[in-house]
Image (cartoon, rainbow, N blue to C red):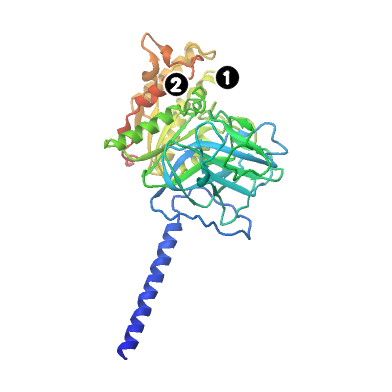
Amino acid sequence: MTRRNGYALLSAIIALIVAVSAAIYVGFASDDSSATSKNVPAQEGAPRNPAAPASTGIWVGAWSASPVGAEPGTELEGMAGRSVRNVVHTSVGGTSARITLSNHYGRSALTITHASIAVAAGTGTAAAIADTMRRLTFGGNTTVVIPPGQQVLSDAVRLAIPADTDVLVTTYSPTRSGPVTYHPHARQTSYVAEGDATEDATGVAYTGQVEYWRYLTALDVLSNESDGTVVVFGDSLADGITSTKNANRRWTDVLSRRLRAAVASGQDVPRYSVVNQGISGNQILASGAGRPANNEAGISRFHRDVLSRTNVKVVVIDLGVNDILRNPVLADPNRILDGLRTLVRQAHARGLKVIGATLMPFQGHRGYTEAREGVRQQINAEIRAGRVFDAVVDFDKAVRDPYNPRKFRPDYDSGDHLHPSDKGYERMAEAFNLRDLKGAAPAEL
């Protein structure tokens, strides 16, 4: 072999190695082992998304909400011919994003022909920062059809999303597809426009307002700021039903800000995002009416709303008061505790640590009785004794009136004697020991 032929052969080998390495890298970057939603087939023929992620990091939950039921009044038309602009607030930032859309409560296929994501221009507005507007695709296509009872995960799109920021996720459906899967009591104003205004950055067309999240159930980001996701699972006390609208003052929001500040100051706490899977009125054991059931019981929705979230590391459970208050007869504390322990076992099977909250007082609420108070005390005693969860956050102790521990301290009470004020939600987040987020599920002997 001549020297010239030898160099040519060597060059060819090097080129082959580079090509193979590039292919391996691309394959690894696109293999999303943390994806939690099953994609349904998208429509063929549309171009691939040109804004695919190029950054490194891991996928974590930046925001999420549980589907609650079928939105009243949308049984036939759904949101046909209208653009739905959901406003959500991030708990962590990232360099790329993807969303999950749900047709869980739909009775017909939901066709989305256009979807977008953008960073909001400010608080309480449908306007976007113009150069952040990105078109979303699903399997490389702009149109996706979601069958009844299913959900879809979008392709990733390159977009710098800051932490503690409003993000606009907009969908347009041209066809009748009811009813709408939604999350009421969002404590966040979202918007509606006639026609396809999906990529309208001005927000001028969005004259309709609503305090619901429609179709959208998750926003994930590719993040260098976080190593995993904390999922808070609860009822209206997690949902933040009495917190100030558009202010992000739920206790989960305050916890997220506390955690980021602690990491920034060098404290020995995990770098986690926080997402909220609270549903107002939710119970551990009982579901609402309908098929599928509205306000599905905690036992039934735990896999979907917790175990299937993106890169979940720790679960926080704040649930049980409604099982006491909404039971037509006196609730059995042992059944409630068994339900909580079932959730813990399911989390442990996934290697997840579970932090549980004590049940807060409700004297003065219309449902209060001495017998129900006794059930609450029995449950709290078991929780505090360490016989339910891996760690405990004592919300009861944090917010109760020191002169009458059966009721809220007055400045922590929203006025209904069941839900906290903004100050009460803040106190709940402050009671949370951030170091309890460290570690995993205990080894089973």
> Image point 57% across, 44% down: which residue?
101
| Of 444 and 74, the residue lying toward us | 74
Question: Identity of the amino acid at label 1?
Answer: Pro
The CA span between labels 1 and 2 is 31 Å
Residue drawn 55% across the image and 29% down it: 286
Q: Position of residue 18 (x, y in %)?
A: 38, 70
Closer to the camera, 58 or 208? 208
Say few, some or many: other residues with alpha carbon within 10 Å of mark 1 (under 14 / 14 to 19 / 20 or more): few
Read off the residue under disc 1. 328
Comes first in the chain, label 1 or label 2: 1
Query: How far from the left and from the top, in percent, is residue 119?
Result: 50, 41
Q: Dividing the image into 4 quarters, which one contains the C terminus?
A: top left
Which secondary structure lies at badge 1?
loop
Q: Amino acid at mark 2?
A: Asp
- Looking at the image, which residue sits at the far bottom? 1
Q: Report whether residue 65 is seen.
A: no
* Element assignment for label 2: helix
Is 433 drawn above or below residue 197 in the view shown? above
Residue linked to disc 2: 422
